[in-house]
């Protein structure tokens, strides 16, 4: 034993273990959910534990130092009188009581309030109600909502457990009934491949997340047949002798079994370092290099059960993990997790997209101590969707700016392996595409010189040529170049003659730009306007103030004010998409401007626009959520009426979540939102004239399927449906029921 290394026996007990004890009152349930880890249903015929047996467990738990009993099932409230009696006994012995239920007993507001009051009277300290798509197959959200409202009346918050699958459709509908109930604390869990879910869940629905520690292993659970299992549910069907099956209370006292659960280095590694660490350590043990790990697991439980079901692997891991180095590491992480729990920083409440977006934006722009504190709070949360975050960040072109953040200790600790791998792969791909973009820009520059004209680069291409060592560069998508209308077609034909790909006879794809062409996979759009005319941007003024690009002879960019105006208005044209990209562009422009931003001129430009809300809505949301360095005096110029608040709410749902929005991206939704953006009848008629004019209809027909075009051509029906969409948006945002 090394003199500098502490004896593992010297470490105090893991403070997260043994604080509470789940106790199955029954395995029967009035529902038969397809994801149930213990396969509860009305048809369960196993013997239920008796009143005396359960009272004995409660008393033994108190003697063993348990702080609270969690009464579970099945559905424990099928034995309501017994649950009340057990809670009374727990309170008498100085323990708290928690209850996990499907909430069937809250069918009416009166029943919910009466029963919750009775539970509180006997010592209830925490209540968890399960409601998700599985429970919705048997009962609607009303019982859970009634219980939450009863809790609000009685000053008692209620947890709502939501179990989900990968790319779950309809999750918004599940969450919606609780969205405006502050006392409802939403917690999200992944379906795990145990019990009924192992048979009923299709392969494509498994999220397959195996990273992170397992908090379920903190609390050993007493089953309905008197066994102690290492976690509540997933280990229910493990056989005798399995490390997750700790033994029967008929053979050993509860205190001895709880001590075995606490002191097992294998179980302690699972709850502090996670099953992935078991895989890593097992791979390094001689003789286990060829252990039959699968390429993909359905979840953390799947990996854990695969490893722990092999007796030789368990024995080897226990010997290895009992060492001093691993004991010290586990102890340190246990203290960290305990501290975060006490501070309320580590929980399973919903991680909203704004918080995740703010975290990564701040990580790119300033990896400060404040960022480190926020990362510790967010990154370890069970419901952080790493796959979705990777998709959003890659789509925004932020892989390269994030490269330094990927090596941060907190990110390395919590992020699954695919997250940094996917971003590094995207960063390499973005770098290669940038080389092609620069080549395309040089060819466009030479063509403009030959034609005797000039062009103005827009969006990502403008940022590319304004490169600065002060900040990393986000990836540009296509290349947009603005030229005079008389020069547009000659430039397009010249580029096609020099090897660019495209149809020479193709018509415009939009009123403000020609049909796209490409160079080695990079799309080139030749613009005759910055944006469609109905937006009313001060394009002449913006073009007059364009600045030359030193490395090119005939290419300019908009000045910083023009690029800011265009960036936020462009976000609105994409139905408030690409929020993180716009926020990064704003930060980049502020850093690289080389002079103070003329906020007064920018304000005047915004006011002169035909649709100023197209700028103000995303600007206000992004400034508020991502702490952009925009002067408060400037933001105070934004409208402060009810419509602005409605639009900001709609935008916020989409700016940080891409496709995850309650309202789908379709022409009807877009029309409804654009109605809200336009002030007054004149503006809306101007928009409708553009929307249904012949030129616009032709552009839409070329960009949509025939069925969509036919639907859009039916003006009366389209207007009627658009008005219905408008009412839905307004009702949702004002928390009013739809009038029909």
Image: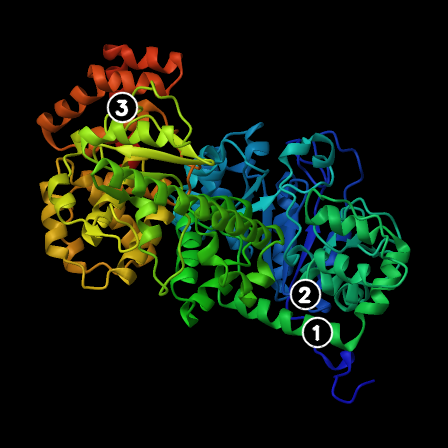
Mark 1 surroundings within 10 Å by alpha-carbon count, few (fewer than 14), some (14 through 19), many (20 or more): some
Determine which residue is flagged by label 2.
17
Q: Is residue 233 left or right of residue 598?
A: right
Eyeballing the image, is 591 above or below 229?
Answer: below
Residue 507 appears in the figure:
yes
Determine which residue is flagged by label 1.
13
Residue in front for this viewpoint, 414 or 686: 686
Q: Which of pointers 1 and 3 lies earlier in the amino acid sequence?
A: 1
Q: CA distance from mark 1 to mark 2?
A: 8 Å
- Residue at 85 percent across and 59 percent down: it is 314
Circle 3/circle 2 CB separation < 8 Å: no
Mark 3 surroundings within 10 Å by alpha-carbon count, few (fewer than 14), some (14 through 19), many (20 or more): few
**Quadrant in the rendering for residue 58:** bottom right
Circle 1/circle 2 CB separation < 8 Å: yes
**Quadrant in the rendering for residue 324:** bottom right
Residue in front for this viewpoint, 77 or 485: 485
Eyeballing the image, is 730 above or below 75?
Answer: above
Q: Secondary structure at mark 3?
A: loop
Residue 474 pos. (x, y %): 40, 52
Q: Is residue 736 left or right of residue 437?
A: left
Residue 471 pos. (x, y %): 37, 62
- Residue at 29 percent across and 62 percent down: it is 591
Eyeballing the image, is 413 above or below 454?
Answer: below
- Residue at 55 percent across and 70 percent down: it is 339
Residue in front for this viewpoint, 186 or 602: 602
Residue 56 appears in the figure:
no
Determine which residue is flagged by label 3.
739
């Amino acid at each position: 034993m090394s003199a500098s290394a502490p004896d593992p026996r010297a470490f105090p007990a893991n403070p997260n273990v043994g604080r509470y004890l789940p106790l199955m009152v029954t395995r029967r349930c009035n529902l038969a959910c397809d994801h149930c880890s213990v396969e509860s249903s009305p048809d369960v015929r196993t013997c239920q534990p008796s009143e005396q047996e359960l009272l004995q467990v409660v008393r033994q738990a108190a003697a063993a130092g348990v702080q609270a009993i969690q009464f579970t099932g099945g559905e424990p409230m099928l034995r309501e009188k017994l649950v009340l009696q057990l809670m009374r006994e727990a309170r008498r012995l100085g323990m708290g009581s928690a209850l996990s239920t499907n909430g069937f007993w809250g069918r009416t507001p009166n029943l919910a309030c009466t029963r919750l009051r009775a539970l509180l009277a006997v010592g209830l300290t925490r209540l968890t109600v399960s409601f998700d798509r599985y429970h919705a197959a048997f009962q609607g959200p009303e019982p859970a909502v009634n219980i939450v409202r009863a809790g609000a009346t009685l000053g008692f918050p209620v947890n709502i457990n939501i179990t989900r699958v990968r790319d779950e459709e309809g999750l918004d509908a599940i969450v919606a009934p609780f969205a405006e109930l502050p006392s409802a604390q939403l917690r999200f869990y992944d379906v795990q491949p145990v019990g009924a879910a192992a048979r009923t869940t299709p392969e494509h629905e498994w999220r397959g997340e195996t990273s992170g520690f397992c908090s379920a292993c903190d609390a050993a659970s007493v089953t309905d047949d008197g066994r102690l299992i290492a976690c509540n549910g997933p280990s229910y069907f493990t056989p005798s002798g399995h490390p997750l099956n700790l033994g029967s209370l008929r053979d050993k006292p509860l205190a001895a079994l709880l001590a075995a659960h606490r002191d097992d280095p294998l179980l302690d590694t699972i709850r502090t370092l996670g099953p992935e660490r078991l895989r890593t350590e097992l791979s390094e043990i001689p003789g286990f290099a060829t252990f039959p790990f699968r390429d993909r697991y359905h979840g953390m439980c799947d990996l854990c059960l695969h490893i722990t079901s092999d007796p030789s692997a368990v024995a080897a891991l226990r010997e290895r993990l009992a060492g001093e180095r691993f004991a010290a590491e586990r102890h340190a992480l246990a203290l960290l997790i305990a501290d975060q729990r006490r501070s309320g920083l580590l929980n399973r409440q919903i991680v909203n997209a704004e918080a995740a977006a703010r975290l990564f934006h701040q990580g790119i722009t300033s990896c400060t101590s404040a960022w480190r504190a926020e990362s510790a709070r967010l990154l370890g949360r069970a419901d952080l969707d790493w796959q979705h975050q990777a998709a959003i960040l890659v789509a925004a072109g932020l892989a390269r700016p994030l490269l330094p953040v990927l090596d941060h200790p907190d990110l390395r600790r919590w992020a699954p392996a695919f997250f940094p791998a996917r971003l590094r792969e995207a960063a390499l791909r973005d770098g290669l595409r940038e080389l092609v973009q620069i080549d395309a820009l040089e060819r466009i520059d030479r063509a403009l010189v030959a034609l005797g004209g000039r062009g103005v680069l827009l969006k990502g291409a403008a940022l590319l040529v304004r490169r600065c060592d002060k900040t990393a560069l986000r990836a540009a998508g296509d290349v947009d170049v603005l030229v005079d209308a008389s020069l547009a077609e000659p430039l397009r034909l010249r580029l096609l003659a020099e090897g660019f790909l495209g149809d020479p006879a193709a018509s415009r794809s939009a009123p403000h730009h020609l049909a796209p062409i490409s160079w080695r996979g990079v799309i080139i759009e030749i613009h005759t306007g910055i944006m469609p005319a109905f937006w009313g941007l001060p394009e002449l003024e913006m073009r007059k103030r364009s600045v030359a690009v030193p490395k090119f002879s005939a290419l300019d960019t908009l000045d910083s004010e023009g690029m800011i105006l265009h960036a936020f208005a462009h976000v609105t044209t994409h139905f408030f998409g690409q929020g993180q990209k716009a926020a990064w562009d704003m930060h980049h422009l502020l850093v690289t401007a080389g002079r103070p931003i003329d906020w007064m001129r920018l304000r005047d430009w915004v006011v002169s626009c035909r649709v100023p809300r197209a700028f103000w809505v995303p600007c206000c949301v992004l400034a508020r959520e991502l702490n952009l360095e925009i002067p408060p005096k400037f933001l105070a110029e934004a409208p402060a009426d009810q419509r602005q608040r409605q639009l900001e709410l709609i935008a916020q749902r989409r700016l940080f979540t891409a496709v995850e929005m309650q309202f789908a991206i379709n022409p009807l939704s877009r029309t409804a939102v654009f109605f809200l953006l336009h002030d007054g009848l004149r503006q809306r008629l101007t928009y409708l004239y553009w929307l249904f004019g012949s030129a616009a209809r032709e552009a839409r027909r070329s960009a949509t399927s025939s069925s969509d075009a036919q639907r859009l051509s039916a003006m009366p029906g389209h207007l009627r449906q658009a008005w219905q969409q408008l009412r839905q948006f307004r009702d949702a945002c004002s928390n009013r029921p739809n009038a029909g």
